[in-house]
Amino acid sequence: MIVEVDGRKFGWGEDARDLPENSEAYGAKILTSEELVALGKAIRAQGWEPFWSTTASERVVFLVEPEKWRQSITARTMGGQTYQVREMKRGRSPRAS
């Protein structure tokens, strides 16, 4: 799945997992609070629930250039954690992340 937020594309699952790391990037892309809120809304609009965790247990979200590369993302307050998504169950109200 790929979602676009403010001209940037973010993906997870088969659309991101097999892409090579972005060789031109130095480390993870640091998202601002505003970017993170917008990304969370876009993810929820597609029926997924975003969350942070120190252990990767679900589908990890990456900044992507489809068919070219992927780059890890983080936020200033979430160092050491991974942004992930899981499908929302029907009838479940989405939580903020």
Image: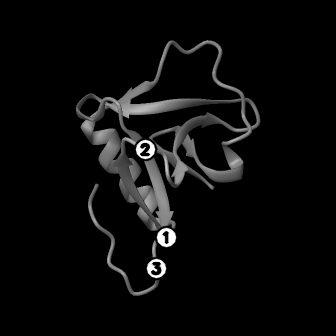
Query: Which disc, if any, is residue 10?
Result: none
The quadrant where residue 41 appears? bottom left
Q: Amino acid at mark 1?
A: Gly
The residue tagged 3 is 89
- What is the secondary structure assignment of the residue under circle 2? loop
Residue plotted at (51% across, 38% down): 7
Looking at the picture, tell me which residue is in the foreground, 5 or 1. Answer: 1
The quadrant where residue 70 appears? top right
* Separation (CA) of disc 1 from disc 3: 8 Å
**Left or right of 40 in this view: 4:** right
Residue plotted at (26% across, 60% down): 96
Query: Which disc, if any, is residue 55?
Result: 2
In front: label 1 or label 3:
3
Q: Amino acid at mark 2?
A: Thr
Q: How is the image coloured?
A: one colour
Contact between marks 1 and 2 (CB within 8 A): the answer is no
In front: label 2 or label 3:
2
**Percent coordinates x, y for residue 34 in the rendering:** 27, 41
Looking at the picture, tell me which residue is in the foreground, 92 or 37. Answer: 92
In front: label 1 or label 2:
2
Query: Which disc, if any, is residue 47?
Result: 1
* Separation (CA) of disc 1 from disc 2: 22 Å
* Separation (CA) of disc 2 from disc 3: 22 Å
**Percent coordinates x, y for residue 27 in the rendering:** 48, 17
Q: Choose the circle earlier in sequence order: 2 or 3.
A: 2
The N terminus: image quadrant = bottom right
The quadrant where residue 16 appears? top right
- What is the secondary structure assignment of the residue under circle 3? loop
Q: Amino acid at mark 3?
A: Lys
